[in-house]
């Protein structure tokens, strides 16, 4: 902070993020889609990550990208047109950020990194406001055990691709 104020770049980015978030939420409000995150790089590269209860396809990302690009151009936020825009899903290797993503992925295998940097891997069988419940396989095919992990102990959760 400079003199108790945020530097201009951060203020501008917050304005851009707010504008983009508002527009995207307007575009998707009557659907099963939801906004996960908006990032702005110093090069005015705007990255929008959306997800959906049933996933999100490339055609949906293209439609939102076109509508959002037009809205940004019309806003005059970048008078020289010096911005780029990417709309995509977060990707399988991206940690879950929202409770809605946790609920969407119940039944899938996840790797949870705890605050002490240890990991737990198993099938996510339940999620509440307080915790995640995993079903873990015991060694030597001796069945499974259930482990409850409070959110305040979780650093990150990543869905695992199992073949």
Image (tube, rainbow, N blue to C red):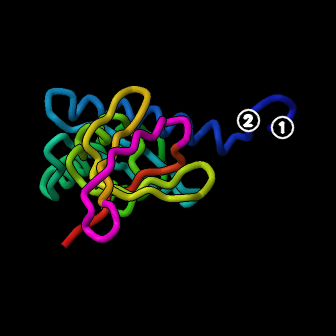
Q: Which residues are magenta?
A: 138-153
In the rendered image, the vertical position of residue 131 relative to residue 78, given as above or below: above
Residue nearer the viewer, 90 or 100? 100
Residue nearer the viewer, 157 or 37? 157
Q: Which mark is residue 2?
A: 1
In this image, 98 relative to 124: left or right?
Answer: right
* Proximity of marks 2 and 1: CB atoms separated by less than 8 Å: yes
Look at the numbered disc 1 and give the secondary structure of its residue: loop
Residue 24 x %, y %: 30, 37
Look at the numbered disc 2 and give the secondary structure of its residue: loop
* Residue 113 seen in this snapshot: yes
Q: Residue at x 83, y 29 (%)?
A: 4
Q: Residue at x 53, y 34 (%)?
A: 15
Q: Badge 1: few (under 14), some or many (20 or more) residues near its Cα, within 10 Å?
A: few
Distance CA(mark 2)–CA(mark 1): 6 Å
- Give the residue pinned by disc 2: 6
Quarter of the image with the N terminus is top right
Residue 76 x %, y %: 43, 40
Residue nearer the viewer, 95 or 58? 95
* Residue 87 seen in this snapshot: no
Residue 148 in magenta stretch: yes
Residue nearer the viewer, 69 or 92? 92
């Amino acid at each position: 902070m400079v003199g108790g104020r945020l530097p201009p770049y951060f203020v501008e980015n917050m304005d851009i993020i707010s504008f983009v978030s508002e527009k995207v939420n307007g575009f998707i409000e009557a659907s099963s889609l939801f906004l996960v995150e908006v990032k702005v790089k110093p090069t005015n590269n705007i990255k929008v990550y959306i997800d959906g209860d049933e996933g999100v396809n490339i055609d949906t990302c293209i439609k939102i990208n076109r509508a959002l690009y037009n809205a940004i151009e019309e806003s005059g936020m970048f008078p020289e047109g010096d911005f780029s825009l990417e709309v995509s899903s977060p990707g399988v290797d991206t940690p879950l950020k929202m409770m809605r993503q946790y609920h969407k992925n119940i039944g899938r295998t996840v790797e949870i990194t705890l605050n002490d940097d240890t990991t737990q891997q198993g099938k996510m069988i339940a999620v509440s406001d307080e915790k995640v419940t995993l079903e873990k396989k015991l060694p030597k095919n001796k069945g499974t055990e259930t482990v409850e992990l409070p959110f305040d102990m979780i650093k990150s959760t990543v869905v695992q691709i199992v073949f």
